[in-house]
Image (cartoon, rainbow, N blue to C red):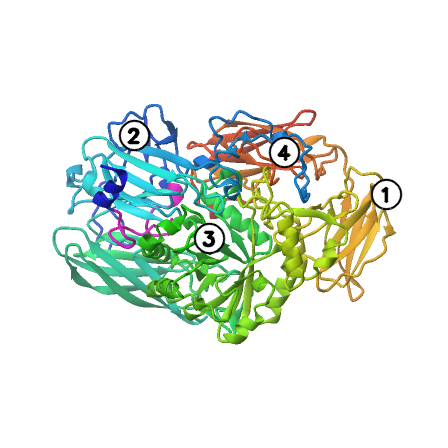
Amino acid sequence: MTMKEQRRDGDAEKRAGDDAVEDSRGAPGGGVSRRRALQLGAVAVGTTALEFDPPAAASDQDGPARVGWARERSFDEGWLFFRGDTSDAADPSFDDGSWRALDLPHDWSIEDLPYATSTDGGATSDPSLLVLKEPDPSPPEPPQVIGPFDTKNSQNGGSTGYTVGGIGWYRKHFRVPELGGGRSTSGLDAGGPQVELRFDGVHQNADVWLNGVHLGFHPYGYTAFAYDLTPHLNPTGPNVLAVRVDNSGQNSRWYSGSGIYRHTWLTVTGPVRIPLWGVHVTTPEVSERRSVAHVEVSVTNLGARPAPASVRVTVLDPRGHVVATRHAPARSVGPGVTADSSLDIPIERAALWSPGSPNLSIARAEVLVRGRVVDTVTVRFGIRSLVCNGRVGFLLNGEPLKITGGCVHHDHGPMGSVALDRSEERRVEILQAAGFNALRTAHNPPTPALLDACDRLGMLVMDEFFDVWDTGKNPQDYSVYFPEWWERDLTSAVLRDRNHPSVVIWSLGNEITDRTNGRRGAQLADRLRSLDRTRPITLGGGSTFSADDPSWSYVDVGDVHYNANGKGYGPLHDAHPERAMTQSEGFPATIHQDTKFVNDHTWAVGNWVWAAWDYLGESGIGKTPMAPEGTAAGIGDQDVMPGWSIARTLHHSWGGFGYPYPYFQGNCGDIDLIGRRKPQNHWRAAVSGVSPVEMLVERPTLPGTEQVAVWWGYFDELASWTWDVEPGRPMTVHVYTPGDRVRLLLNGAEMPGGAATPERSMATFTVPYAPGELTAVALRDGEEIGRTTLGTVGAPAALRLISDVTDLTTSRDDLAHVRVEVTDSQGRLVPDATLEVTFRVNGAGELAAVGNGNPHNVDSFRQPRRHTWHGQALAILRPAKRPGRVTLTASSPGLRPAALTLAVGQQRTRSDRAQP
């Protein structure tokens, strides 16, 4: 039987909402936390024992309900992997003894290629981002195969950062031991425990087998899917799960990664249960005095006989105190039937959810049969209201709010697409500190962990579903499967994400080519509204070109990209004054214009810059051209003609849409690949008024040229007054400020100039270089509002290590991101140092990845060495599964080494962790 015939003959994939259970992520009163779940499986010689607790009866009076076995546990540990294709690997008897053992999540495209022999990361470590119109042929050719990079065998080329996809296989051996309580594993049938496996995401084209039985095929790389294992489990012997992942062909416009890159979960319940994402909480009434939680609970009977099932819902406040309980009357639920119950639960003086006060309440839904609790699901939710229209703009809990947003792809730089909870949490923490209050999940549903972090920390989200519909952007992208799969994938994403208070806008897609005159978009919008009517719907870039675009007929919010290609979106709003509008992609080079436009128009509710965080792929679109002097003055305003046209010509003339290898990342984020602020974020801080003054100095260009910040690119500049140039060399200094004047002092002498242009929040100086101190003093109406100083530092003398956490847990989901800095003899960062650093790890942990922010420094992310960029690099530590201590040592020839030790303790919630 061919693989396609197997899919047609035996595809057992459940559609979202059928026969599965809600994820209980550590809420009080039910479920298993993600951290705790990672400790539940026992792995021995490649075989995982599924430890089911013995059943225990729970009566209606027993207080917090308890299911007789752990309802949900991680299934991430104890897998085997083979990179490449092989026959018969779905057969349980297949010999996988030579396969590599690993834990999920896993991305093989970020790993070193087995045939990569070059270790010359120094060949591409030049810190400059300045690019010529034609790439300079004089430097040595960069290594064509190094680490994960291969210019010839990467089917997507610069789109995916010259990484390699292909085919990979995963297998897992596990046993189902005695359940206890007089019930043996032979009861794994319609009347006994139900066992289900869920994948949070596999990229892409995943075929799954259990004990040789083909469970199903799932093509889309960004949606969750689940299978019922119960009918196919071997109750007395070993079980073998096999997964084939096919990430071949031209299928992505950005780095996707390859493999089972998100978490896997095993859910065990009785036959009467709450199906996957079967609890839905909305808040139709919200006020400081009285709010109402509307809770819908689905109950499925997988047993052989009717069951008299009732539902009880308890609401807990953010401190875990019970504030209300309601019951739905019992009803007979027949075999194979799903019954729905709805409850309106008043809540007095509720703590509302908002970015400034992200209060999370809890709904605990229990299913009772003859007075006994047989299933319990807890979900976190936020009590908040949304209004979004052209008259009042965007209101959250009745208060106006402007969105300062950023687009993010799903990769985590040196980790590739591996999605660990701490990676997602750190991303949100850093972006909030950088001034963002919203993310756009470009261009696919995110991980549950990212939305959990946004809920907990107070980050708003535009949740986007697709990059293509029926018409593709690459020959083998999701458009091949979209007609058959869109409804399942849209449904899965909405049911999974609709309880998250951080999600405030749905986006049906990004820059979609719809050849159906709006019919397809209307189908998607209708299906979405049948699942959730509490949030507005938009289409990323759908309103960019005309006021009569078909998308206006089904979206609630009009959306443009790059200010409507210079035409401005004011006229679009004039044609649809009842609609609010957003710009879900804007240039870094137009931050000031975009922010001012939103602040000046109530109906323009926010901007999302492309991009908030640097990402792998779309290589070099954020380049900084060295153009002939006078070019920047000719561009003028890039938002309007003729500036738009000149900027477009300049961008595409310098190396094409992106820039050739060795550029491997977009280089257009406010934050670089390892989490450090880039120049445009300093500008953003002044534009928004968060910072009174920021000062950066441009990297010198060739004679007769100048830097130009155009479209996705920005200036190559540093907060540095340490430059390897001759004294007297003219240096361009940018001082960003919301003030109206700047005084610039070099070694106490005031420099000429100083007017801050109000249309830019920037003052530009030309200063003859001399070592010493450069001080900028920002003023408004003659009064000082802030000052900052850059000083010339000494030669590299030592290394310094700085961790983002003060300790680690034993969870494999935990990480420590340790920054290494090159310092002079006085402990000051050497801002442009480029040195190779070697890492060594001892104790209860491992080196998960290394990296820097340099967008053209191709090198391994896995070897224990890395060159610094801007005097910094990153080492990522992952803890062992045992308590102890882990020590990281960093060294570089001629410098004083540095060491850092972190305790690795038992599992604790993140809120219990001290933050540095």
Q: Position of residue 206 (x, y in %)?
A: 33, 41
> Helix, strand or loop at disc 1?
loop
Q: Residue at x 39, y 34 (%)?
A: 103
Report crowding for label 2: few under 14, some 14 to 19, many 20 or more residues within 10 A (C-alpha). Answer: few
Q: Position of residue 860 (x, y in %)?
A: 54, 31
> Helix, strand or loop at disc 3?
loop
| Residue identifier under label 3 | 443
The numbered mark, 2 or 1, whose residue comes first in the sequence reads: 2
- Range of magenta residues: 13-36
Report crowding for label 4: few under 14, some 14 to 19, many 20 or more residues within 10 A (C-alpha). Answer: many
| Residue identifier under label 4 | 124
Q: Answer yes or no: is residue 776 visible.
A: yes
In 3D space, how far apart are the residues under numbered discs 1 and 4 (Cα atoms)? Answer: 30 Å
| Residue identifier under label 1 | 728
Give, as a three-letter code, the residue at label 3.
Answer: His
Give, as a three-letter code, the residue at label 4.
Answer: Thr
Q: Position of residue 215 (x, y in %)?
A: 25, 42
| Residue identifier under label 2 | 87
Give, as a three-letter code, the residue at label 1.
Answer: Gly
